[in-house]
Image (spheres, rainbow, N blue to C red):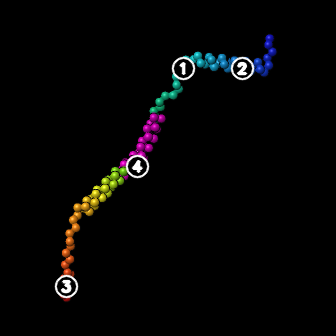
């Protein structure tokens, strides 16, 4: 009979643990223990709707501000073109200055 010391006990414990691990690996795959729960799904839908209710008006406001800024830029460009065309096409005419009429009391 071999002498049992701390090293041999440790070896026996390791062998036992290895056997348990090997036997667990040979078991058929277990089904997952989770399933879709309706109240959790409703909670998720509620949270998504709240976030959307907060975000949608801000997004619409940002889009309208972008469109307004673009329209203002287009208008500024058109006004600049009109100013340049007016300066280019405007003939200079002599201005007749008439004397101021004298008003009698």
Sort mark 2 into few (<14), some (14-19) or many (20+) by Cα contacts within 10 Å. few
Sort mark 4 into few (<14), some (14-19) or many (20+) by Cα contacts within 10 Å. few
Q: Which residue is mark 3?
A: 102
Secondary structure state at the residue bearing disc 2: helix
CB of mark 2 within 8 Å of CB of mark 3? no
Q: Which residue is mark 1?
A: 29
Sort mark 1 into few (<14), some (14-19) or many (20+) by Cα contacts within 10 Å. few
Q: Which residue is mark 4?
A: 58
Q: CA distance from mark 1 to mark 4?
A: 49 Å
Q: CA distance from mark 4 to mark 2?
A: 65 Å
**91 left or right of 5?**
left
Dot 1 or dot 3: first in sequence order is 1
Q: Is residue 68 visible?
A: no
* Residue at horizontal 25 percent and vertical 61 percent from the top: 88
Residue 10, quarter of the rendered image: top right
* Residue numbers of the magenta segment: 40-65
* Residue at horizontal 36 percent and vertical 50 percent from the top: 66
Dot 2 or dot 1: first in sequence order is 2
- The C terminus appears in which quarter of the rendering? bottom left
**Picture layout, residue 23 above or below residue 90:** above
Q: CA distance from mark 2 to mark 1?
A: 26 Å
Q: Where is residue 43? Give x, y as percent.
A: 46, 38
**Picture layout, residue 75 above or below residue 11:** below
Residue 51, quarter of the rendered image: top left
Secondary structure state at the residue bearing disc 4: helix
Q: CA distance from mark 4 to mark 3?
A: 66 Å
Q: Closer to the camera: disc 4 or disc 3?
A: 3
Dot 2 or dot 3: first in sequence order is 2
Q: Which residue is mark 2?
A: 13
């Amino acid at each position: 009979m071999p002498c049992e010391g701390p090293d041999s006990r440790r070896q026996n414990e390791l062998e036992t643990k290895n056997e348990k691990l090997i036997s667990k690996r040979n078991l058929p795959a277990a089904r997952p223990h989770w399933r879709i729960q309706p109240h959790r799904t409703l909670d998720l839908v509620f949270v998504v709707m709240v976030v959307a209710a907060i975000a949608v008006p801000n997004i619409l406001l940002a889009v309208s501000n972008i469109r307004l800024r673009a329209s203002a830029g287009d208008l500024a460009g058109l006004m600049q073109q009109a100013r340049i065309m007016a300066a280019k096409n405007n003939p200079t005419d002599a201005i007749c200055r008439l004397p101021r009429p004298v008003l009698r009391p």
